[in-house]
Image (spheres, rainbow, N blue to C red):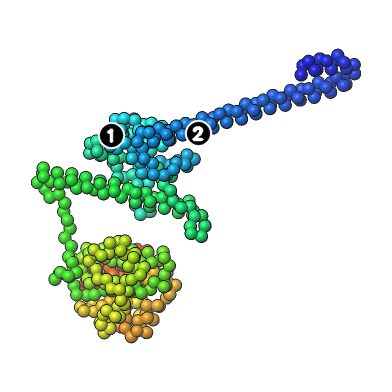
Amino acid sequence: VVVVVVVLLLLCSNSSLFFILCFYSLLFVVFLIFFARVCKQMGNFLSQSQSTSTSVRAGREEKKDGGGEITAHVREDERETIGVEEKIGREEGNINGTTATTLSGKRHQGDEPVDEEDGVEDDEGKDYNDDYDDNDDGGEESVSKRPKYLLKEIEVPLVDENGVPFSKGRIRKMKKDKLWELRREERKEKRRRKRQEAKQRARETGAPAFKRKETVKMGSPQARNIHVAVDLDFEEYMTIKDKRKMAKQCKACYSKNRRMQRPLQLHLTSCNGFWKSCLEKEDVVNWDIHLHEKSYVEDFDKDNLVYLSSDSDNVLERLEDEKVYVIGGIVDHNAHKGLCHRLAVEKGIAHARLPIDEYIQMTSRRVLTVNHVFEILCEFTAQNSWKDALLTVIPDRKGAREHGDK
């Protein structure tokens, strides 16, 4: 460029033409400098990207050569240290006192945790890293069974059956559920070790290893002869989500009855189809409960039936033996108001409501869940007081209080 400028200077006798040529020459020089800097930055970026990908591949190959077993593919742009099932040389003992290669190619010495989180707890209280305590003194076996997991490595479907993509929260929830299932065997192993340690301490100290709570079966003489049936013949009125809520309420009823010193006779009627498959997952076959595939009208005497409904004008004053008190097993968010009462009238069955207005006052609707109704009946049989039973069971959000209490 300098040579060209000098030649033009010698050839040009006009001063104005000389200044124009100098100006455009300077612009050309600035453009060349800018273009050179851009090319240099692009070259640095490409070389850095190539070196990064090479290190990642090398880390994966080194991971596989070290005996690691990975159950899902790694996504380097979405790394979150929560969990995936990873077994690193458990048989060879290469975790205790040796270097363990993480999925990103980095190394940690000894039994240092790969991630910095202590565990993630979801809505149901599941702690996904609580099975392996850093303070566990179980020796080499406990150290070798202390893997840390990466949640992003769990593979789940990203779209539903219709091709609609799931939300990020839904995908995260499915990954947590799958991870919880993957670690089922590890949790069983931890519980087994705790039982063995408790037995060992019991042999050394002479104290009992476990204090098992005694439960009274419904077939024992201590149990009451008052029957309570949950009518599950409302499947067509509920969504899948409401059906699952109803199954949880049935489980809560069984849990309450199991803790009673004198349990009631709890029945589940019309337990077929969806309800049978859903409750079988909860191991209902081992419950101390009466299951009926037929309707309550077919399995019980019609004269002994009393259908409980908040829309009834009759007040339930006492519970009688041999009577069967039916609770409508429906979760409809008040979409089918008066359905249970109408069905009871159509079938010619006696109906009644709990004496809520006679003993307490409430600031909300008198409609209660199935498990709350059953718990009120249980508390009444134990305390022989409707007011105490209602105030004990009804949640605070309903605003239940005694008459005259502001």
Q: Position of residue 17 (x, y in %)?
A: 87, 21
Q: Label 2's element? A: helix
Q: Which sits in the foreground, 82 or 223? A: 82
Residue sitting at 43 percent across and 48 percent down?
Answer: 155
Q: Position of residue 80 (x, y in %)?
A: 43, 42
Q: Say which amino acid is labelled 1.
A: Gly
Q: Position of residue 255 (x, y in %)?
A: 26, 63
Q: Say which amino acid is labelled 2.
A: Ser
Residue sitting at 25 percent across and 65 percent down?
Answer: 285
Q: Quadrant of the C terminus?
A: bottom left
Q: Quadrant of the N terminus?
A: top right
Instruction: Mark 2 or mark 1: name the one nearer the start of the chain.
Output: 2
Q: Which sits in the foreground, 315 or 388? A: 315
Tell me where residue 109 sits by quadrant: top left
Q: Residue furthest left?
A: 206
Residue 304 drawn above or below residue 378? below
Find disc 2 in the rendering and name its residue.
53
Find disc 1 in the rendering and name its residue.
93
Residue sitting at 38 percent across and 41 percent down?
Answer: 70
Q: How far apart are the two marked residues, 2 and 1, measured between alpha carbons? A: 30 Å
Q: Residue furthest right?
A: 14
Q: Label 1's element? A: loop
Residue sitting at 24 percent across and 71 percent down?
Answer: 290
